[in-house]
Image (tube, helix red, strand yellow):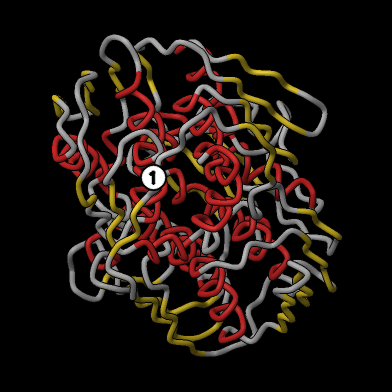
Amino acid sequence: MTAFREILPVSRPVNGSIRPPGSKSLTNRALVVAGLAQGESTLTGVLDSRDTQVMIDSLRKLGLAVDQSTADCTVLITGCHGRPPASAADLWLENSGTSIRFLTALCALGQGRFRLDGNRRMRERPIGDLIDSLRQFGIVVECELGNDCPPVVLNGNGLSGGTTTINANVSSQFLSAVLMAAPCASSPVTIRLAGEMVSEPYIDMTIGVMSDFGVTVDRSERGTFKIAPQTYRATHYDIEPDASAASYFFGLAAVTGGKVTVNGLNAKALQGDVHFVKALEQMGCRVDWNADSVTVTGGTLQGIDVDMNAISDTAQTLACVAPFASGPTRIRNVAHMRLKETDRVTAVVNELRGLGLQVEEHEDGMTIHPGTLHGGTVATYDDHRMAMSFSLIGLRVPGVKIADPECTSKTYPQYFDDLDRLCASSR
């Protein structure tokens, strides 16, 4: 593995356009839903990354036929009509939160013993709220180490239906996992939420994918989701470019005063993270929404106070734009970021301080004060978003090195190559 990658600063504003790879969040949802469908589905725009590779590998271990063409970004998957064929499987999910959470609920539909595990960080990431919700359906499932974290061992006997309550203030992925499995239950499912929901746009995304495969969810009562037994219909599904990845290119326009267009996204995108640009607009950028693209033009940046609960995967991006604004930027209501690939609040604070900034850490976020930046090596904590976010600072500040740049393979293996292509004419 490469020890670090030094980011070469640009000497003028960056102008250009790009289409990031497919959304990781949509890819893994589409793989699960297509895997549960009746018939063969074709997925296009599929992301090829570590998180999606472990999902595909696990679906194959569960007995599903999955034919992937990485060159064409397509997957052909023959669904199991709501019943995973394998009677046992040992699934390795590395540090993919979507994969282990979605597959835990999917395994509950099967008949047999299933074990799901991951790397050291995965064994620190909570899954107890999902386990509790599945137990309310009568599923025999436990955290092997007794600490509400993976490994998870589940003895599946199908999902009978009924009512469950899910704590929604740690991760929206727990709710998404149960939602996607629920139509395959033998009787209606009612899901009630306890606590304030985090990252709510991801639930809209999940329900949107389910709808495209022919399943409806009744959410007429706030905080309650009702799902009747239904059959997912195989379909052709095109996956949007990753809006979280797009945030780095929107940030690129902001920090260099340039103009960058991201193709394949618009205001109606399923991914809530596309609305990251509204934060940049508050800071002084111009945003142009088009039918099949979004363009950000940099301006004179000013600090803002912003609640990023709904789009927390882009909070690190904004934290790396903030040093170039006049006045402090307060990022709030993102305490759940501490339970991601790393404690993202503390990690961002520490690395910004290491580059010379004054940064205050709060339980729910941080306040970043502009100042004089200097070079240094940025630790990435095996977190792809640390690497990609802090590359933006290196475009303005000489001597910034990104440690373990290969960690971007989790969601965007070609990130640094794409960044270099976009910046080449401005260096």
Q: How many tags in the picture?
A: 1
Point 23% across, 47% down: residue: 343
| Quadrant of the image containing the N terminus | bottom left
Q: Which residue in the protein does label 1 denote? A: 391
Residue in front for this viewpoint, 247 or 53:
247
- Nearer-the-camera pick, 180 or 122: 122
Q: Nearer the viewer, residue 52 or 126?
A: 52
Q: Name the kind of residue labelled 1 in the image.
A: Ser
Left or right of 247? Residue 331 is left
Q: Residue 82: x percent and y percent? A: 69, 70
Left or right: where 372 falls relative to 81: left
Locate residue 71: give its quadrant: bottom right
Name the residue at 44% across, 36% down: 314
The x and y percentages for residue 27 are 64, 58
Residue 232 located left or right of residue 82 = right
Within 10 Å of the Cα at label 1, are there few (<14), some (14-19), or many (20+) other Cα atoms? many
The spot of residue 124 in percent (x, y) is: 22, 62
Q: Residue, x 47% and y 65% (percent of image)?
A: 409
Task: Report the front residue among 18 and 139.
Answer: 18
Dot 1: element? helix
